[in-house]
Amino acid sequence: MRRRGWLEVRWRQFRRAPRPVVRAVASSLTVALVLGIVYLAYDVAVGRGATLPGGDLRLLALAGYVAAVLIVGAVVTWFVVPLPTGGARRTARTPWSAALGLFAAVPIAYLVLVVLVELVKPLLG
């Protein structure tokens, strides 16, 4: 049997990722993109001098973004990622389903925010 190289193994793992992992990442990415765009719109509005109620609350908005992505990512993953069972009719959800969503949401929240604030925001002017 031929021994595969590191890159070939990682590429195979990427192409054949387990469905629960793909669903967890997709749900967290969707939530992060929607909330990230809302945060970006708020950040651009405050940066352009818009007078909003409460003043400049970008730090609070950032904390709310991260908390919301983590919580909603965990909850949505809990709903869409049932644990595998032997029977086809019964679905089981445990805190591990939510933990999978939480662990997937942490890097996704950071990466989406970096892409939006560091790459997209300068393009908006």
Image: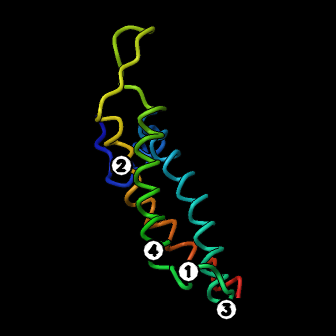
Give the mark nearest the N terminus, 3 or 4. 3
Q: Nearer the viewer, residue 57 or 30?
A: 57
* Disc 2 secondary structure class: helix
Q: Which mark is residue 84?
A: none
Mark 4 to mark 1: distance in Å? 11 Å
Q: Is residue 103 above or below residue 38?
A: above
**Which residue is drawn at the image coordinates 53% and 58% (left, top)?**
32
Mark 2 to mark 3: distance in Å? 35 Å
Q: Which mark is residue 102?
A: 2
> Which residue bears the numbered disc 1?
54
> Which residue bears the numbered disc 4?
60
Q: Given the image, on which type of amino acid does mark 3 rest?
A: Gly
Marks 2, 1: nearer the viewer? 1
Say which quarter of the image contains residue 12: top left
* Disc 3 secondary structure class: loop
Q: Is residue 107 above or below residue 45?
A: above
**Which residue is drawn at the image coordinates 64% and 81% (left, top)?**
52
Q: In this rendering, would 46 be left or right of 88? A: right
Tell me whether the residue at label 4 lies in contact with that at label 2, contact meaning CB atoms closer than 8 angstroms. Answer: no
Give the mark nearest the N terminus, 4 or 2. 4
* Disc 1 secondary structure class: loop
> Which residue bears the numbered disc 3?
49
